[in-house]
Amino acid sequence: MQNSLENLSEIKLQPQYGLEISGLDLSQPISDEVASYILNKFNQYSVLLFRNQKLDDAQQIAFSRLFGELEQISIMTAATNQYVYRISNIDNREKILAADSNKRKLLNVNTYWHIDSSFKSPPAMASILYGKEIPEDEVTSTAFCSLSHGYDCLSPAQKKRIHNLTCYHDYKRSLKRVNMVELPEYELKNLSACRQPMVHIHPDNSTQCLYLSGHISSIDGLSEEEGEQLLDDLFKTVINTDTLYEHNWQQNDLLIWDNRCVMHRVSNIPAKEIRRVHRTTVRCPAPLIPASATI
Ligand code: OGA
Ligand code: MN
């Protein structure tokens, strides 16, 4: 099938963001015209869904490169390809992981609200997640929350308080939260940590966005207690808005999200059936632009 703009159809996923696009076969070549259509929709809708895609690693990588330069995997424990993160609830012998296994604990990091690679600078721009094997009976979903609409829902006092703040993002914070202390030294060494603004300007649509992630380990200038309290308030406010989208997975879904303006979490990891999803990640071409840098 030749990919063209003529055969497309679009359905909104959620009133404020998210778009399902049908009529494209992403394993096939994408013309400049179709690529710029997809990039525009990505910047406008923040979450894109393409169903019924049949992609191998090379095809997923080729498609992902339309968005920019790919991140290399930092934790090879869960990968076999330097660009494709294989996320699954099974071990090397295809047995469902024991609850106390290291790999299962690593999966639990994704059950907390987060932004992918927020602990890197530049951080991740797009995550592209492919539903390779999705359970038939156990429901598995990924939840999203908009950080631009979420920002708009903050009170003027909250906005004023956080405008100039910077936060330290550290993946080790998330490892600690899931009681994972045994990551090998050579893995830990690949995990950077960095400062990010708490509010930034999305470079492609100019909206102000909160940059809120479970990887935040401290807020500059605040005590640990004050920092935890503020994060708690912010998470509660944005999660309680009407900007949630819960994606119920079907096999062969390709879901793309903009880490600059949505955060996400996996809602449930199946306990009995196999779930395999493959992620490629596109880097931001430049560090985030702090809202405080603009007038
Ligand atoms: C991720 C992630 C959610 C999921 O890949 O970064 O958070 O549903 N995944 O597996
Ligand atoms: Mn994630």
Image (cartoon, grey):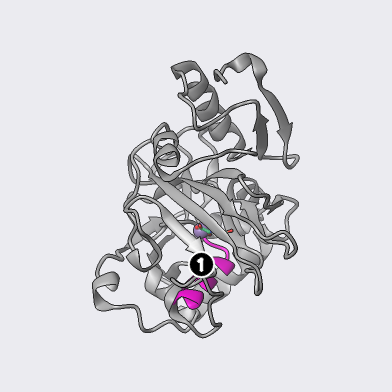
Q: Nearer the viewer, residue 184 or 96?
A: 96
Q: Quadrant of residue 53?
A: top right
Q: Residue at x 39, y 56 (%)?
A: 196
Q: Residue 249 location, x and y as percent?
A: 67, 52
Report whether residue 150 is seen: yes
**Mark 1 Cα shell of 10 Å, populated few (<14), some (14-19), many (≥20):** many
Vertical relation: 173 (above or below) 204? below
Residue extending farthest top? 6
Q: Nearer the viewer, residue 282 or 223?
A: 282
Magenta stretch: includes residue 105: yes
Q: Would you name the residue on which mark 1 appears?
A: 214
Magenta stretch secondary structure, dominant: helix
Q: Residue 102 location, x and y as percent?
A: 44, 79
Image quarter where the N terminus lies is top right
Magenta stretch: includes residue 87: no
Report whether residue 290 is seen: no
Q: Is mark 1 within 8 Å of ligand 2?
A: no
Q: Nearer the viewer, residue 107 or 13?
A: 107
Q: Residue 131 location, x and y as percent?
A: 58, 51
Q: Residue at x 38, y 74 (%)?
A: 172
Vertical relation: 233 (above or below) 10? below
Q: Residue at x 54, y 48 (%)?
A: 130
Count how many numbered circles sit on residues in the image. 1
The range drawn in magenta is 103-114
Vertical relation: 18 (above or below) 85? above
Q: Residue at x 46, y 56 (%)?
A: 116
- Element under label 1? loop
Q: Residue 292 location, x and y as percent?
A: 42, 47
Image quarter where the C terminus lies is top left
Three-letter residue code for mark 1: Gly
Left or right of 155 in this view: 98: left
Q: Nearer the viewer, residue 208 or 137?
A: 137
